[in-house]
Image: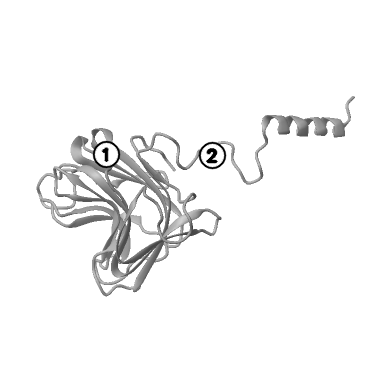
Amino acid sequence: MRSFLAVFSAALILGAAVGSVPAGASAASPPSCPRGLLFCEDFERLPAGGPSTLNWGVDTRNGTLTVERARRGNQVLHVHTVDNGRAFLRVDDFAAPGNRFYGRMRLRVDAFPTAPDWAHFTLVEATGTGSAEVVRPVGGQYAPTVPGTFWGVGADGGPTGDWTNWRESAPVVEDTWQCFEWKIDAADNRVAVWIDGVANPELTASTSDHGGNDVPFVLPTVDTVKIGWQLYQGGTTPGDFDLWIDDIALSSKRLGC
């Protein structure tokens, strides 16, 4: 009978031969930027500090974007704004087959606005040709009547007007990493959102079902996507805002979290 030591040694040799996985790693973990995506940024190849890349642009007013090391060791984008400022990573010359695409980002927000009343904010914005609608699949609003701050799909600039269809079923969570996904689809002009892999059916919009004026909601042919933060009212509480974003991807297929 072979000794336990001999069996154990053989197992170690076999494990080394087939390629063992280091502690804390997962053999099944997919790369954050696999091939075939319409856009991807995980910030790992960028130097720390201000943005230094030709893959995306910057849109800021009273705000900054900084690549920095996160608590878990990976690099992330730190978004900082003052009062009703904005700071966006901007994807230009974007084109999705059939004007249908999915987005994903990982997100941690230090604090959301609690003043002024009805303060609303945007984290993802899509614009393009053929429609004046500025589509905001990921955004939210402080509702003093509840009270609370909630996620909501919204839009501005087009026939449907300026609206954020916030939902009590989707309260914001501060200082916690979450995964947000969204879908923009020219078929029925549909917008949909998932949070941590779970769909929230109330966070949707379509041609005839949205939060604006009683006219059809028509998506633009999207050629620009902005990801970051903008708050539209001044005199905010808190007076400035910090959030961290990672693993941004735009794809013709849903990527999941």
Residue 69 in picture, x, y percent from top left: 51, 58
In this picture, is 60 found above or below 152?
below
The answer for how far apart the CA atoms under marks 1 and 2 are is 28 Å
Amino acid carrying label 1: it is Ala
Amino acid carrying label 2: it is Ser
Which is nearer the eye, 39 or 14? 39
- Of marks 1 and 2, the one in the foreground: 1
Question: Residue 228 occupies which quadrant of the picture?
Answer: bottom left
Q: Secondary structure at mark 1?
A: loop
Residue name at image x 11 percent, y 52 percent? 213
Name the residue beneath numbered marker 2.
29
Check disc 2: other Cα within 10 Å, few if <14, some if 14-19, many if 20+: few
Question: Residue 194 occupies which quadrant of the picture?
Answer: top left
Which is nearer the eye, 98 or 172? 98
On the picture, is 162 further left or further right than 201? Answer: left
Q: Secondary structure at mark 2?
A: loop
Name the residue beneath numbered marker 1.
95
Q: Quadrant of the N terminus?
A: top right
Residue name at image x 12 percent, y 44 percent? 216
Residue furthest top in the image: 1
Which is nearer the eye, 203 or 97? 97
Residue 89 in picture, x, y percent from top left: 34, 54
Residue 45 in picture, x, y percent from top left: 48, 49
